[in-house]
Image (cartoon, grey):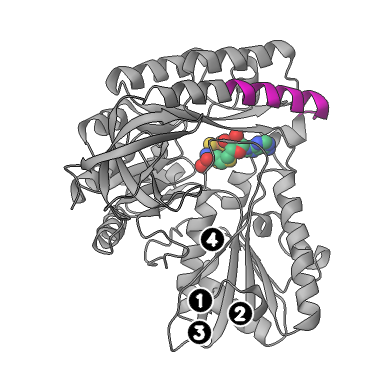
Amino acid sequence: MEKIIDESVQGTPLSLQTSEENNRKLYIESYGCQMNFSDSEIVASILGKAGFNTTDKLEEADLVLVNTCSIREKAELTIRKRLEKFNTIKRHRPEMKVGVLGCMAERLKSKLLDEEKIVDMVVGPDAYKDLPNLVQEIDEGRNAVNVILSKEETYGDIAPVRLNTNGVTAFVSITRGCDNMCTFCVVPFTRGRERSREPQSIIDEVNDLWEKGFREITLLGQNVDSYLWYGGGLKKDFEKATEMQKATAVNFAKLLEMTAQAQPKMRIRFSTSNPQDMTIDAIHVMAKYENICNYIHLPVQSGSNRILKAMNRLHTREEYFKLIDTILEIIPDCAISQDMITGFPTETEEDHQDTLSLMEYVKYDYGFMFAYSERPGTMAARKLEDDVPEATKKRRLSEIIALQRQHCQLRTEQHLGKIQEVLIEGTSKKSQDHWMGRNSQNTVAVFPKEHYKVGDFVNVQMNSCTSATLIGEAVGYSENNQ
Ligand code: SAH
Ligand code: F3S
């Protein structure tokens, strides 16, 4: 993952899961957030039981699935271009079927079948268990659509097939949907209301990953701090739970603690945190357990109180600063990253300056920055005119990216001279002779391979850096190493 990204959206083909009993080939491409990549592993698992092995060769696929993203218009346009490419292949191989999964499927529903003639099947994020039936429908020559959103579905009972894996790091999803209704965001519409996954199934998955050699997991959700298990059902219905259910409910701090205790040597990360839902308890749990990484992705979107309000972000700039101060008091070396949007409707130059000054205060370790893109159906699209000129959005975007670059450099330099634990994930992209891994703060480090191997926890002396990468030298195994 790059430290500074703007509008780039990349699809990644997932490979390779094989079973001798299966005789059909599935090619899945995923776009957008980590949740989509994690969902594709669930889809591969469901279809693995319905006769499909995955392939990374598009030309030999019987079924092509695109797990789509609707977060910005550009993401959707990229995917539509990709569908055109599939169309050219289908001309030579008319038996190849194409299905659209994920947020675009949910947003556009059966309209997609009319707009994109190549598409045979449209399946929303809560309907993946229906895939075997839907595939049968298309086998019989009919188009198939299921975009029903669910109150309960968390796929807690599906063991994801780890695709395209480095064998060391994995995602474990803990919540689905989002109730926050930020006015710019399409996610509550495409992924439905918030619900949490049963904690024991999460712990079982983490234990299983450890057994298989994985050494780092990321607990995933649109808003992980809002996690709440009380026996199943929507978060918003918690009020209606019985006294017993309320008394035994598991919140995010508790889940984090349970996970850290279940596998004391497994590195634990989580994403994404919403400032208004983050609790002091969760921060204390992070501080208490060595194996929970000191890194929080804490999107703020804007530094202006007026814009935060218009975005329906339920906190002020001052409350955000207070949260940052508290985090750093409890975990002084905690890395923090942001998501930011420039050019939200009515954003003035003064609002933009507020964003820059907020960034100066926090000096984020990393950032993910975007120009506002109006999404049909959202409150902002319905109530506010997209009135900031494209050129202004882009100029403000480049200003915040430039500032973030400086802060990245500064934060990366702060690790210099230290010896830090790095988990080796694979060979460095730039050099065959170097390993690549990350420190607790999620900063990438590279160092000569020597006798170490993938999955080792190694202490690395940090000698120099670029703006986003530490360059060092191993000084031995860390005490965590197995
Ligand atoms: N809570 C989610 C947020 C998902 S969207 C999570 O798990 O990360 C990721 C980021 O995309 C948001 O934080 C926001 O910065 C950006 N984004 C969302 N809607 C957008 C829009 N309409 N235009 C531009 N950027 C948007
Ligand atoms: Fe979107 Fe806000 Fe939820 S950004 S995913 S509505 S926290």
Amino acid type for the residue under numbered disc 2: Val
Ligand 2 image position (quadrant): top right
Give the distance between the C-alpha atoms of the residues marked 3 and 1, in whole angstroms.
7 Å
Eyeballing the image, is 72 above or below 197?
Answer: above
Per the rendering, the mark at residue 126 is: 4
State which region is magenta: 384-404
Horizontal relation, residue 482 to residue 232: left or right: left
Per the rendering, the mark at residue 135 is: 2
Give the distance between the C-alpha atoms of the residues marked 2 and 3, in whole angstroms.
11 Å
Give the distance between the C-alpha atoms of the residues marked 2 and 4, in whole angstroms.
16 Å
Per the rendering, the mark at residue 47 is: 1
**Where residue 475 sits in the image (x, y, percent)?**
23, 38
Decide whether residue 37 is among the magenta residues.
Answer: no
2 or 1: tag closer to the N-terminus: 1
**Where residue 334 sits in the image (x, y, percent)?**
35, 26
Which is more toward the observer, 151 or 69? Answer: 69
**Do tag 2 and tag 1 residues touch (Cβ < 8 Å)?**
yes
2 or 3: tag closer to the N-terminus: 3
- Residue 305 appears in the picture as rendered: no
Eyeballing the image, is 400 above or below 181?
Answer: above
Amino acid type for the residue under numbered disc 1: Leu
4 or 3: tag closer to the N-terminus: 3
Eyeballing the image, is 429 above or below 136?
Answer: above
User: Mark 3 = which residue?
Assistant: 51
